Image: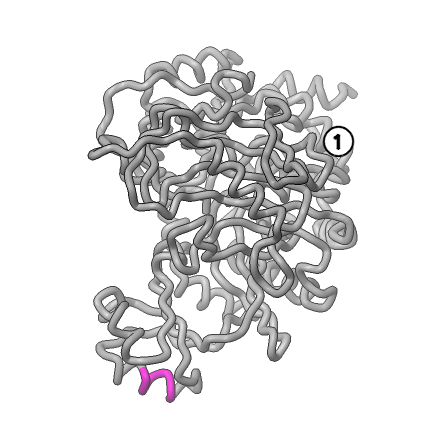
Amino acid sequence: MPDLADRHSKGPPVSTLRNMSEIRTFFRTNDTPIFFVGPTAFNLLGVDRWVRNFSFISYYDSWDGYHPRVFSPGEIEHEPFTSGEDINNYLLQHPDVRAHIAARSRQAGVRPKVAMVFFDEETERICEEEGYDLILPSHALRQHLDSKLTTTMLGNEAGAPSVPNVLTTVSSYADLVEQADAAGLGDDLVLQLAYGDSGKTTFFVSSREEWNTCATDVVGEDLKVMKRITNRAAAVEAVNTRHGTVVGPFMTDLTGYAELTPYRGGWCGNDLYPEALTDSQRARAIEHVSKLGDRLRQEGYKGFFEVDVLVDLDSDEVYLGELNPRISGASSMTNVTAGAYADVPLFLFHLLEYLDVDYDLDVDEVNARWRELAAIDVWSQLIMKTSDSTVRRIEKAPATGIYHVNPDGTLTFVRPTLDWHYLNEPDEAFFLRVYGEGEYLFKGADLGILVTKSRLQLEGGGLTERCRHFIDGIHAAYEVVPVEAAPRAEAFLAYLK
């Protein structure tokens, strides 16, 4: 019988991958070109270490040409970007990108595979015309599942409850209070619109004054009205496979820190560490995510998704939070955990669903192993935006690579490197720059992403001293000048989650 490498190189495999060793070999001998397309390479950075012929097409070249598997085409004329989808569609239609993909897709009968975070119907049309396989659930299905109201209903059907809530519309503050009272939610409420970034579409209402600040946004809209609880939020990535749902490690969120985001409640990082959840909370959270995954499969969804869970610190109840039916911004840590190195990074389970291969997988065994190995991992990341509304032009920007925090709190650039896999010490961090020299900063613009092997948030809330040193040091490395107008000030929107 030919070995796996032979079977793969000559076309579709003729037998099933039977274990994790064969799965790893399958990816290390992969001949199918796979491209991650996005404003940056951040979300799946490092997957190229595991998957042969996996590379990145990025609008921003965070490495200034240093990374051998990141292709950033030269700028050509385009309409102003208003979303991450616009950037991805621009890239896919760029003549240099088309030539780049064609040059790496010469094997007869093998269609290049394309993955990304955000896409729309136009993206699907472009991929179909160009002969690319978009290895993601359809935009229509993702749009349906992206609704916070839909997530709540599907979770309820699956036995994965949300924080006590009512799904409704409201016409006034009196109407809101009446409905909340009838549902037993109390008078301290959280209101969420069906769609949108939670940092911008979540409102906290405990008085008429707070209602007045959001009334124009919520009156007449489909809403999830929740009881406000004292909670710990934890994020987890998972993959819906034909064999069940593989659940990654849980990490706490950093939200709303003014040093990192201008948006109240806006996501700005994660801490992954053993005590993020208790053993009991982790077991219940895994059960919720698995049940939701089972229900998503009934909707036709397969592959990668991210879920937020909420732990009520007063009752110890574990609730289902938001669903993000896409590759997420937490993969930087999920893909370098002990579980990932014991088996394969979580995203490779997604690839197994979209590549032409049959495989066996004991999902319960993988989940049990990853849960046990979660006791030794400590990783954290910061998603660094600017809160300053002044438009400024960048004259000098910090390089992508490894930085070290000194005893006096300053940062020293140590060396360029491809990703965060070589981090060893808690005083080291990998910074991936987004905006570089000649770009513009404005309120909400992304400076970059910082990844480190140390906690960045205190147990009771607040940022650690080391975290503040990292933030101050990165800001200090930018040299900017104010400008009266910035032609590209809206070119880049939040796209990481």
Q: Is residue 418 left or right of residue 371?
A: left
Q: Main secondary structure of the magenta part?
A: helix
Q: Nearer the viewer, residue 126 or 435?
A: 435
Write the residue at 46% across / 75% down.
228
Q: Image quarter for residue 279? A: bottom right
Write the residue at 37% across / 48% down.
387
- Residue 397 picture location, percent across and down: 44, 27
Q: What residue is pinned by disc 1?
A: 22
- Residue 361 picture location, percent across and down: 71, 44
What are the residue bounds of the magenta stretch?
177-181
Q: Is residue 421 left or right of residue 59?
A: right
Whether residue 87 is visible here, answered yes or no, is yes
Q: Nearer the viewer, residue 9 or 168?
A: 168
Outermost residue, front direction? Answer: 408
Write the residue at 33% across / 84% down.
179
Q: Nearer the viewer, residue 272 or 281?
A: 272
Note whether 438 is above or below 163 in the view shown. Answer: above
Note whether 65 is above or below 380 in the view shown. Answer: above
For the N terminus, give its image quadrant: top right
At numbered mark 1, what does the secondary structure look like: helix, strand or loop? helix
Write the residue at 53% across / 59% down.
308
- Residue 348 picture location, percent across and down: 62, 36
Residue type pointed to by label 1: Glu
